[in-house]
Image: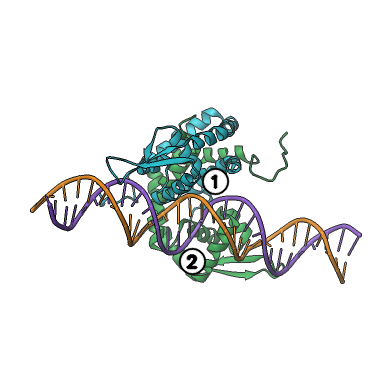
Chain colours: A cyan, B green, C orange, D purple
Amino acid sequence: MRDFSRSLPMSLLRAREAVMRQFRPKLREHGLTEQQWRILRALAAIEAAEVTELARTAFLLGPSLSRILRDLEARNLIERRTAKSDQRRSMVSISKDGVKLMASVAPSSEAIYAEITQRFGARKLGELQEMLGELEQSLAGLGAGDEASAEE
Amino acid sequence: MRDFSRSLPMSLLRAREAVMRQFRPKLREHGLTEQQWRILRALAAIEAAEVTELARTAFLLGPSLSRILRDLEARNLIERRTAKSDQRRSMVSISKDGVKLMASVAPSSEAIYAEITQRFGARKLGELQEMLGELEQSLAGLGAGDEASAEE
DNA sequence: CCGAGATACTTAACATGTTAAGTGAATGCG
DNA sequence: CGCATTCACTTAACATGTTAAGTATCTCGG
């Protein structure tokens, strides 16, 4: 069997960890986890979003998002209100405190990203992301889903 | 600020998830998580390994590994014995049952990997892994560690 | 030989990943 | 309208990620 440490999943895992290791300490200084930071960034880019939409954007599963939103709301970093047209839906938005926190973390985050880009090379970074996107695309609609064996 | 959904961490996260989504259902049929499978595969390639060495190979943190080894041992998939020369060290090896389980899962796993390779393209896969390795290397020795600001 | 420090784990505590089940509200069909 | 179904979340339960603290053992200088 192939040496699993050279398998694609392990390559992706190690690469991502190498990248995230750069960000975590700074986020931690501000009491944020990687996931919480993703949510704040996603919310900062829009007015408000439904929970399901936010889950898709921040690439989090519903249950994780539910817990995190509960905690972020308790810390007054986000705000929620139920949609008037549909009582099931909840509109989430970033709060004033959330915006301030973002502003205090963003510069460091950008600096780290710039350092990574410089070390790896901007061109190669672009190529890498291109390939990652293609990989994702080539596997879209394969396994896992609830598709009733709809493969031709 | 850059659209975070196009950031390198998100690209890596989505790509890895797209890949792992292919494997998880089959592993689950056999009552294995992704991490447990990594450990069994790592152990199958060697006679025995110390816990620390195994953590490095399977890319798991010590505390996670401790818990998983406890569970795998309870399921009789691995065996442990303390090293004679150093009572602190524990030698871990895969058991007969572990080998049998590996044998029953490996074919499906290989088939899935082959399907991914075929969809994405063997050459591109090689290039991608090459780039991921370079990314990892270019960030080696940067942040996170306990280095006392040893930057030039 | 002995005690301070280093090592190799293990435990603890809290956050998230993952699947299944639960809850309340909206929809659609007879 | 009535009610089964679907939908948008939320809870629950268990496994892992992550950092800090704990435990037993080993090493080494004095």
Q: Nearer the viewer, residue A152 or A90?
A: A90
**Mark 2: secondary structure:** helix
Q: Nearer the viewer, residue C10 or A79?
A: A79
Residue at (60, 37) in percent of width and height? B138
The reply to whether residue B121 is in sight is no
Residue at (35, 51) in percent of width and height? A144
- Chain of the residue under label 2: B
Left or right relative to A79: residue B135: right
Residue B71 at x, y percent in the picture: 51, 67
Distance (Cα) linking label 2 and label 1: 26 Å
Label 1 is placed on what type of residue?
A: Arg
The circle on residue A147 is none
Which residue is disc 2 drawn over? Answer: B99
Q: Are marks 2 and 1 on the same chain?
A: no
The circle on residue A14 is 1
The reply to whether residue A145 is in sight is yes
For residue B38, above or below residue C11: above
- Chain of the residue under label 1: A
Label 2 is placed on what type of residue?
A: Val
For residue A21, above or below residue B79: above
